[in-house]
Each structure stands twice: as C-alpha cells, then as structure tokens.
Image: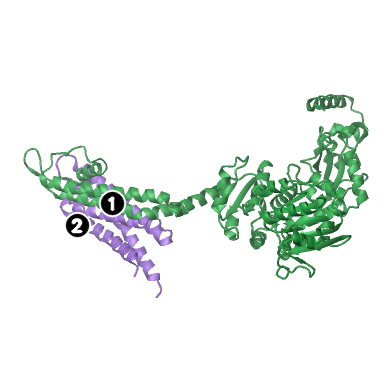
Amino acid sequence: MSDVFFLVLRRLRIPLITLVVVYAIATFGMTLIPGVDPNGEPWRMSFFHAFYFVSFMGTTIGFGEIPYAFTDSQRAWVLVCIYVSVFAWLYAIGNMLRLLQDPTFQQAIAERTFSHNISRIDQPFYIICGYGETGMLINHGLSELGIQTVIIDYQAEQTNTLELDNLNFAPIVLTGDSTVPDNLAKAGLYHPHCSGIIAVTENDHTNLQVAVASKLLNDKVPAICRSEFEDEAENMASFGTDIIINPFLVFSERLNLMVHNPSLHRVQTWFINQQSAEHIADRALPLGRWIICGFGRLGKTIQSHLAKDGIEIVVVDPDPIASRAPEDTIVGRGTEAKTLHEAGIMDATVIIAATDDDANNLSILITAQQINSDIYTIGRVSSESNQVLFEQANCDYIMRRSQLVANAVLTSISRPLVSNFIKYSSGLSGEDTEQLIRDIESLPGRRDPVTWRLILDPFNAPAFCRHLSSGKQLTVGQVCDNHRISEARCIPLLLQRSGVSHLLPRSDMELMHGDELLVCGRRKSLLLPQRLRDNDELIDTLLNENHHYIPLLRWLSRSRSDSVETGT
Amino acid sequence: MNFEKVLFAFFIILALSLNFGFFIGEFSNPEHHHPYELFAALIVSIICTLMKFGDRTQFGSTVLASSLVADLQLIAAVIFWALANNTGTGLIDGAAMASITSLAGGALIANLISVVLLIIETSQVRK
C-alpha cells in the first residue's frame, strides 16, 4: 500500500478517536438518565434508541424527542451533547482539510502521481536532469520530435512554467535533487523504454554525479552530459559516459574550421539541426591578429586551439595572474578604447568578447567596431534573452552556449549518423570538401539539402534485405544513384557498420545486413533508397535489369502525380 | 517510557478485561450479562483499532487485524441485542442471549490474541 494511505490514516487517528469517545459518552448518558413514558411510568432508553438519537443529534441537531418527550434532566444532557459533538465534528473535519493542504501530504501525492505516470510510459523516453535554458531547449526539441521526456530539477519555479507551454508531449516533472540515485531510479532509469539520460545542469560536478550514478545503476542507458571543464569531461569519459558535450570546445573547433576550411563549416551547418536559429556567418574568418577579451574557459579553449598557423592571439584580461593568462596579456577589461588600442586593435582582424558578462561583451564589441569598422566581431551571449541585443549590435558571430549544447544533444539523439559525420568530417581536406559541395549543389532541384538514414534491417528495408538474402550484391552506388530515376539521386555521406564509421563511402562499396547509410539529397519527392527499400519490383527492375512493364508503368504514373502535387 | 505505548497497552488490556467481564456468567442467562459492559467493550475495542491506524510495522498491522475482528464480532453482538430487544417485551430471551454471548466469546479470542502479540513484542525488546 502507498505511503499516502498510511499517512492519512495516521493523521486521522486522534480526530476519529475523539469522535468515537464523544459519541460513546453521549450515548452512555442517554441510557443512564431516566425518562417518563406517556403513561407517567419511569422509562429508560435502550442503547439502540440512544445511539439512534445521538447519531442524528450530532449531525443535524434533531428530528425531535423520540420515542417519548424528554424530561428536563434528559434535555440538560442533550444540550451538553449538542455542543460537544459539534466541536468534535469541527475538529475532525478541520483536521482532514488541514491534512489535504499539508506540504508533506501534497508531496506524497505528487510522488505517487509521478511514479504512476512513469510506470504508464509505453514509448521511448529521455530523462533530462536540470531544466535551465539548455534543458528547456532540449525539452522543446524532443517534444517536437514526438519523444516523451522526464525532467528532474530541484527548483519548482523553473518547472512550473512547463504547464503553460503548449507542448505536444507533456513532460513528467520530478522536483528533486538529480544527484540522489533514488530520484534517478524513480524517474525511470530502470524502465525498459528509457532510451537515455541527459545531464545539463548548471553545475559540472552535478552532471558528473548523474553520469556516474546512471552508469553504475544501469549501464545500458546511454548518458549524454554537458561538461565545461576538461578534467571533469575526462572523468566522465572514464565512467563510460557516451556523449560529452563541451560547448567551448565545440565552438573553438568551429572557429578553427571557419579559419582553415570554411567550406566544410558550411557543409556541417547545413546538416546540424536545420530548424535552429544559430547565427552563422557566411564569410570565412581571416588570419592575422585576434584579440580575446576575457581569459576564462572560452578564452583559454580558443587560445589553445587557434594560436598557430598565421594567427597571433592577443589576450585582454583584467586579472591575468588569477586567470593564469599568458605573460604578454594586456591588463584591462577591453570595454574602453585605451586597452583596445594597447592590444593593437587598428590592425587586428578579429575580436572575441569572451567574458561571462553580457553587458561587458556588448560594450567590447561596440567599442571595437567604432575604432576599427572592418573588424570581425564574435560575441559570447550567456542569457538567451540578450541575443537580440547582440544582433542589434551587428555582431558577426554569436556564441549561444545553451543553443549550441541543445543542438548537439538533439542531433545526436535524432540523427546519430549526422553527429558522426560532423565528428569525422573534420579530417576532410579542403579539396575533398569543395568536391562534396559541388556534388551537393549538382543534385537536381533547388531546395535545401536534407539528410536521411537508411537502416538495412528487415523492418526498415525489407526489399533490400530480401535482395541481399538471395545472394546478390548491393553497392552504395546502386542504392544512391540510378540513371533511370536521376531526379531521386542522393549522395552517400557516411556508412556505419558494426560501430565503425566510413566517411564518404565509395560507390562500389558493398552493403551488408545491419549497415546504416547516411545520404544527402534534396527533398523534392522521395529519395532513391527511400523508394527502393520496400519495393521488390523496383529493385528487380533497376538493379537486376529484369523487365516489369506493368508495375513500372504504375509506378511512373504514381510518381508523376506526386510531383504535380508538390508543385515542382 | 513511551506514553503512546503505555496508552495502547492500557486500552488493549482494558478491551480484553471488559470483554471477559461481559462474557463470564451463565451462558444464556440475561441477568448475568450487562449491556453496559458490552457497550464499554465495543467502544474500547474501536479505540484500539483506531490507535493502530497507519502503523506500518508487522506487529502493528497484525494487532490491527485482530482488533478489527473483535470489532466486527462485538458490532454483530450489539446489533443482535438491539433487534432482539425490540420485540416488545423489553427483555431478551435465553436463546438470543446465548447468541450474543457466543459472539462476544469470539471477540474475546481476538482480543486475547492482541494481548498475546503485545506480550511477545514486549519480551523481544532488549535492554
């Protein structure tokens, strides 16, 4: 039985005992006091009558004096009983009402509702620890993807607004400390449908604790964590955390890419969360002198990643000793022109406002633009609400930490192969990237490129599997390109086979059962692998060169009407 | 000394002794069984039940069960008395009295079990 039930019973002990005692005394008194029957004979009430009378007296104050009119002494006793019983009832009812409003009771009810909701989940869900800006973005993204979420946050104020958001999937909320293993278990860590735990609290150490606890309790559930310190990240990795996202590192790598291989950066941003409003600049970052204002975690990461190959980094920090900045650091905040001049802003190419104070960052960027109007400005925005100000200040590239983490998490959940592509494509050379861009641009149609994942298993691609099982070979080229349906052509980006990723697979590479293939095409109608995967006749026609006149005619007429509907 | 435990022991033993007091006497003789005693036994037994409400220990739930049995038996006896009394004569006959006494005897066993459980629980407390 539940805690709530026992709690209610325990709290009702005293009020109920009071009621019983009051009724017992009243009944007992009624049987003791002598009355007179209509013939003038002395008469005493039986227990049955006495209890009957007391029952209606206590609740309604009476249907009259029955069975016979009372004597004065009986009336005096009834008078006492009326007042005592009214107070006993008030006391009992008051106690019950107070119990309903009691925080402990409410908490018990909330916990019971929560565990009931968790046990009722019948689809894959993710546990999100920490509902700050990042948690909110991830939750919205997952809800749009139609994925159920469970949120743990210790601040009820944060999660209260959830009721007002009109989400497709209402998240299940637990107000509690996510570092307590019991709370993770309550949130469904052992649930068969639990498909991952996402730790994005403000505190790195909390994220680490969640990662460790989830791996020890149930290591089958993938853990995704945000970590802003490299040593914490290494610690997390040693516990088998599946995906660790360091926003500063991701951002620095992007900057690096924008300097040395801007076209690859362009390709990657095509495929990262396509609905996101991450502010992406088109022009490549110039080499030369870069000024970093603020030598915190972001400043350090950028400095260690970019101080090479034609970039000279000048650090501006108000307290170089405390922040362990390099020796030639310019002392100052960077918000005033004098410091910026000292840092050599006149011939600098890029300025990065990397402090954790939005107002200072804005001031740095505006001052820098006033002095050197050609300078490329990069600003770090900490609070999502200040994003507008940075856009108004004509900041060229805005680093939005929460959005960056949320996008990385959502991409790795909804499109894991895209995540892998981004990870491994960093090694691509400039020429290969240019070639890839030309390939993508040469795809028929004018819409934005999209990605799609082909999974070679009997559920997702039955026709391909039958084709493979019959002993015939199947190559990447056959799946992606066929001269007879050239408008459905697509480009293979990544082939994943038993955990190993093959970047840009060659078209003569053979496919096997269980492979996953990421392709890129333009969403005009269906891509070639999408058409082939469950169509035996089409595979037979296109791949085996057998002739199926009638099905082909049927299919052609259908595809023509499709393209009319889409208006292309 | 835990006041709650003293109070509970008091009530549970009182329930047993009142019940016994009502039960003892010639089985079907109405003159040997007083209604006030039955009334008191019932009220004290109900209070015992209420005092064990919401107790999650093994002892608490077993005592709750046995005192619920006693309540049921005593309530049945009281209802029987009320119905038998209302035939008009004012007194109840021997057969009705025998039924009431036997119901109270059943309640006596249940109360006895409660007291035995109480003694066992007390003897298990180490110094």
Residue A474 can be seen in this image: no
Mark 2 surroundings: few (<14), some (14-19) or many (≥20) residues within 10 A: some
In front: label 1 or label 2: 1
Q: How far apart are marks 1 and 2 (CA)?
A: 28 Å
Amino acid type at circle 1 is Val
Is disc 1 placed on a helix, strand or loop? helix
* Disc 2: host chain: B
Q: In which quarter of the image is residue A290?
A: bottom right
**Residue sitting farthest toward the left:** A40
The total number of labels drawn is 2
In terms of image quadrants, where is residue A304?
bottom right
Q: Which colour represents chain A?
A: green
In the visual, does A18 lie left or right of A121?
A: left
Determine which of the numbered discs, if any, sits on residue B25 in the image: 2
Q: Residue at x 82, y 60 (%)?
A: A344
The image shows residue A419 at horizontal and vertical percentages of: 78, 50
Whole-percent x, y for residue B49 in the image: 34, 55
Disc assigned to residue A20: 1
- Relative to A537, residue A322 above or below: below
